[in-house]
Amino acid sequence: MNIPISQIPSWERPREKLQELGAEALSNAEILAVLLGSGSRSHSALALAQELISSLDKGLHQLEELTLVELMNFSGIGLAKAARILCALELARRVAMNPGTSISVSSPDAVYSYMLGKMETYQKEVFICLHLDSKNNIISEDVVSIGTLNRSLVHPREVFKKAIKNGAASILVVHNHPSGDPGPSQEDKQVTKRLKEVGELMGIPLLDHIIIARDRRFSFREEGIF
């Protein structure tokens, strides 16, 4: 039932609840309602949020799969509301991708443990470059491409331009195989070879390329393909 926000007790309204108890006390629908900011003519922000969540067959993760246009096709959500949702998701992803403390990735297992949770949020292939200091601590992370991996999407110029800007001593690249098979394709091998060669010329070596596929991983260095 759609109850106007004004008729909900103040202590149960999403914003007031946030102010009193903190964001962790809010339900998924309440968080989404705060992001939406307002409802439509027929629905409060909370009711609109609840309807949107109930329409997601795969749960909240499905929000990351929706485009701006797909969100705007949902009744009651226009450009402003759709943009706020997508920007909140992107901001959360960027926060997760940039650690505030030094994290060392000195082995394929360490990389796998660190990246698995991040990679599981993506439904498409994502190619990520980790910028490392001289002690193999992560300086920053860069999402190089989203989509099927090929040499045009992962161009050394773009990879190393950001690595240089961030003062990286070396780089390590990671991408996922949503299919569940971590075995490298021919394109994976070609991209790796190209990045390794350019890294040697630039003085910013490529330490490894790791493919993550659910509960399995593949390390180019470990398998001796380097």
Image: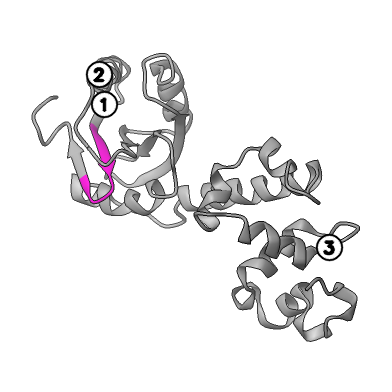
State the extent of the magenta-drawn residues as a range: 208-216
Judge whether residue 163 is colored magenta.
no
Query: Residue 12: image x %, image y %?
Result: 76, 82
What residue is shown with label 3? 43
* Circle 2 residue: 200
**Residue contact between numbered discs 2 and 1, judged by CB atoms under 8 Å:** yes
- Residue at (74, 63) in percent of width and height: 33
Q: Quadrant of the N terminus?
A: bottom right
For marks 1 and 3, give the CA distance.
Answer: 55 Å
Q: Residue at x 29, y 51 (%)?
A: 104
- Kindly report the distance in space between the C-alpha atoms of the residues bearing marks 2 and 1: 5 Å
- Quarter occupied by residue 224: top left
| Residue drawn 78% across the image and 85% down it | 11
Report the Cα–Cα distance between label 3 and label 2. 59 Å
Mark drawn on residue 205: 1
Q: Crowdedness of circle 2 by 10 Å Cα count: few (<14), some, many (20+)?
A: few
Element assignment for label 2: helix
Q: Nearer the viewer, residue 155 or 148?
A: 148
Q: Is residue 208 left or right of residue 92?
A: left
**Where does residue 154 sit, x and y in percent of width and height?**
40, 21
Q: Earlier in the sequence, mark 2 or mark 1?
A: 2
- Which amino acid is tagged 3? His
Membership of 214 in magenta stretch? yes
For the residues bearing labels 3 and 2, Cβ distance under 8 angstroms: no
